[in-house]
Image (cartoon, rainbow, N blue to C red):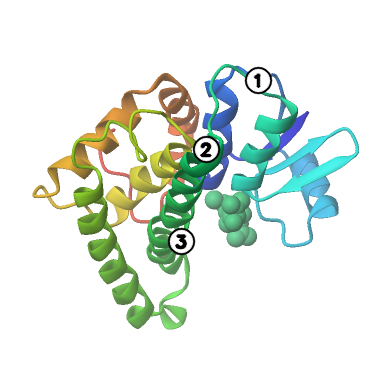
Amino acid sequence: MKLYAHPFSSYCQKALIALYENATPFEYRSLEEPAANAELAALWPLKRFPVLVDGGRTILESSTIIDYLQIHHPGPIRLIPDGDAGVDVRMLDRIFDNYVMTPMQKIVGDRLRSEPDRDAYGVNEARATLDRIYAWLDTQLTGREWAAGAIFSVADCAAAPSLFYADWAHEIAPAHVNLRAYRARLLARPSVVRAVDEARPYRSYFPLGAPDRD
Ligand SMILES: N[C@@H](CCC(=O)N[C@@H](CS)C(=O)NCC(=O)O)C(=O)O
C-alpha cells in the first residue's frame, strides 16, 4: 500500500492517524518529493491529498481511505463501529471536515493569496462558522472522552488535525473548556503525537505563523 501525503497536511494527518492507530504498514510517498507529486497528478487530476493506492485500486478522500482500511486492512482499533454507532461517528466526521476543517482552510488559504485577491468577507464568514461550531462542539463534548463517546473513532481522526490547526487560525475561546480539553486529549494520543511530530519540521509553511505551542 502507498499513501501519497504531506506530513503538514491536515487531511493527510487524518489518514495517517488511522494508519498509526492500527500500526498498518504502508509506503509513505511524501509530497516533498517531485516524483511523488508527478505520480499523484497521474492518479488524481485534482491533485488533492491524501491518496491511497492498494494494488490496482486508488482510493480518494480521507474518510473513504479510513473506511477502506477497516474493510481491507483491519486492525485491533475499529474506527468505524457497526450499526447506529457508525452513523454517529460518520456524522461527526462530516461535521469536523465541513465545519472545522473547511473554515480553517479558508482562513489559512486566504493568507496565501496576494493582497488584491484576498476575500475578507469569506474569511469573516469562516471565523463566524468556527465560533458557532466551537460552541456546539463544547456542549456536545460534555462528559465525553472522544468525539462520539468512549471509543476513539474516525471522527477523532478528523477532529485531531482540524482542531489542531483551527485553534492556530482562530483560537478556541477559554470558556470552551470541554473543547479545549478534548483538543489536548487528542494531542496526547500516541497516533496524533506521531503525526504532529512528523509535521514539526514544516511549521514554517503555516502562513499565519505557527504559534509557539503544541
Ligand atoms: N476532501 C478531501 C480534502 C483533501 C484536501 O483538500 N487536501 C489538501 C491538503 S490538507 C490539498 O490537497 N490541498 C492542495 C490543493 O488544494 O490543491 C479529503 O478528505 O481527502
**Between marks 3 and 2 in the image, the one whose residue lies nearer the viewer:** 3
* Residue 30 visible in this rendered orientation of the protein: no
In the depicted structure, whether residue 130 falls above or below residue 125: above
Quarter of the image for the C terminus: give it: top left
Q: Where does label 3 land, which residue?
A: 98
Q: Count residues near mark 3 (Cα–Cα under 10 Å), then give few for <14, some for 14-19, many for 20+.
A: few
> Which amino acid type is marked by label 2?
Gln
Task: State the separation of the CA atoms marked 3 and 2.
Answer: 16 Å
N-term-proximal mark, 3 vs 2: 2
Residue placed at 13% from the left, 42% from the top?
177
- The reply to whether the C-beta atoms of the residues labelled 3 and 2 are less than 8 Å apart is no
Q: Secondary structure at mark 3?
A: helix
In the depicted structure, whether residue 106 falls above or below residue 149: below
Residue placed at 77% from the left, 48% from the top?
40
Residue 13, numbered label: 2
Say which quarter of the image contains residue 108: bottom left
Disc 2 Cβ-to-ligand 1 distance below 8 Å: no
**Between marks 1 and 2 in the image, the one whose residue lies nearer the viewer:** 1
Q: Where does label 1 land, which residue?
A: 24
Q: Count residues near mark 2 (Cα–Cα under 10 Å), then give few for <14, some for 14-19, many for 20+.
A: many
> Which amino acid type is marked by label 1?
Thr
Where's residue 18, x and y in %?
Answer: 56, 30
Task: State the separation of the CA atoms marked 3 and 1.
Answer: 27 Å
